[in-house]
Amino acid sequence: MKKEILEEYEKIKDKISKEEFLKQLKERKREYDVGFMDDVDIAHMIVGEYLNQENEPLSKREYKIAEIAEMEGADRNLKIIGRVFRISNIRSFINRAGKEGKVANVLLADETRKIRAVFWTPNIKLLKKFKEGDIIQIEGFQVRGGFAGRKEIHLQPRATIRVLDPADHPNIPEYKEEITPIADIREENKEVNIIARITRISRVRTFERNGREGKVASMELKDETGKITYTLWNRDTELIKELPLKEGDAIKVLGAQTRKREGEVYLTHHGLTRIIKGDFEVPEVEEKILKIGNLHEKRDVNVIGLVTKIHDKINFERADGTTGSLRSLEIMDDTGAARVTLWHEDADLDIKKGDIIKIEGGSVEFDNYTSSHCINTNWSTRIIINPEEDTGLIKVLKEYREHLKPVKISSILEMEEEGEEVDVVGRILSLGDPREFQREDSVGIVRSMELADDTGVIRVT
């Protein structure tokens, strides 16, 4: 038994045997299973319960209501009073024992400072007792060093919370829930609250940074003044399924952080942000599909097209040594055709010739090499393969798809015009050897064969 644990036991040795004390210590450790509490912390909690049961008076220090700025890591059995400024979404995690746990963060403030309070699995039920703006008293926590060296409090499994009368605490800062219109979000590194409707949710993507795998997903949000991208990282991407969120949902976001990328402001979810679904007054989603014949340089466009050609995937290495991949497709609708470049994970999508694809959030650029407009995907693009939508365009594309099927060799032999691209299925009758030929600046290789079906024979080069 550690010296510190033995010292705790000495306080209640006349009330409980050492064996029973150690048994409770072991059971509590297994029950709580939270990383911030060690054996000494749990022993101190057990001792406190026995002393409380006997109604023994505790010292002023043990019951002191601490100001946030005064708290130190060694302090025990403090009470804290503060106003609730932020309540995060509840997040799930897998603990060291392989069990699922839950965690949430609450930002408190008194007249001296703000501090983060961490609620673990046994404390999650306490979140129902209060809301943003309430003044609460928390008893049963430990002060720990948090992110960037800032102090934070971690609730113990048997922590208690009381909501207090604001009139008794006039000096604690007021809470104001100000909603910012999307059009007014211009500066980075600011915290904002917004009410908006989800117009698009990307799929969760993986990436590697400093040898570790991460996850990212984005949502496009829109209110009556504009639209903005909202990004979730790593464990926060699971909120899409847990809340759950879908396109068309109206949401309130409290405490989103503003960031800038390529001159554009976007929002990101962090440890104290909360997404709330509700019946908020925001515009309904009006989806606009851009016809391929009307493509022009523009970001965040939606296009539907029939895949007419698929090129091989290309892998490449960046200057920093990391690798990437791309793949090009050709699509068409009833107004024209265009090339689509799929980047990174999108290059591995199971897309086949004849599929109808819907691209949400693509970027249109002018390609000087082909003198035409092309579509690029990006990290917030979503691609739906064979969307189940009953639209006139999709009906037309399904009719076009019939013309992409392999043709008979006799039909090819009857074609009067050259240059038409076709698919053909046949049996190889003969196969010539590869032959080299000289180009102006290089050497090429060519090979010929004869291909046959039930309608004829044709030479293939």
Image: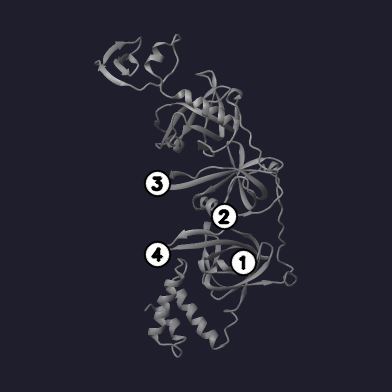
Circle 4 is placed at which residue position?
Answer: 97
Amino acid type shown at disc 2: Leu
* Residue 128 tag number: 1
Nearest to N terminus: mark 3 or mark 4: 4
Label 1–label 2 contact, CB within 8 A: no
Residue 398 at x, y = what percent? 52, 29
Residue 421 at x, y = what percent? 44, 18
Describe the element under mark 1 as helix, strand or loop.
helix
Mark 3 or mark 4, which is nearer to you?
4
Distance between mark 2 and mark 4 Cα atoms: 25 Å
Circle 3 is placed at which residue position?
Answer: 211
Residue 31 at x, y = what percent? 45, 72
Q: Quadrant of the C terminus?
A: top left
The answer to whether residue 369 is left or right of residue 129 is left
* Residue 222 tag number: none
Circle 2 is placed at which residue position?
Answer: 243
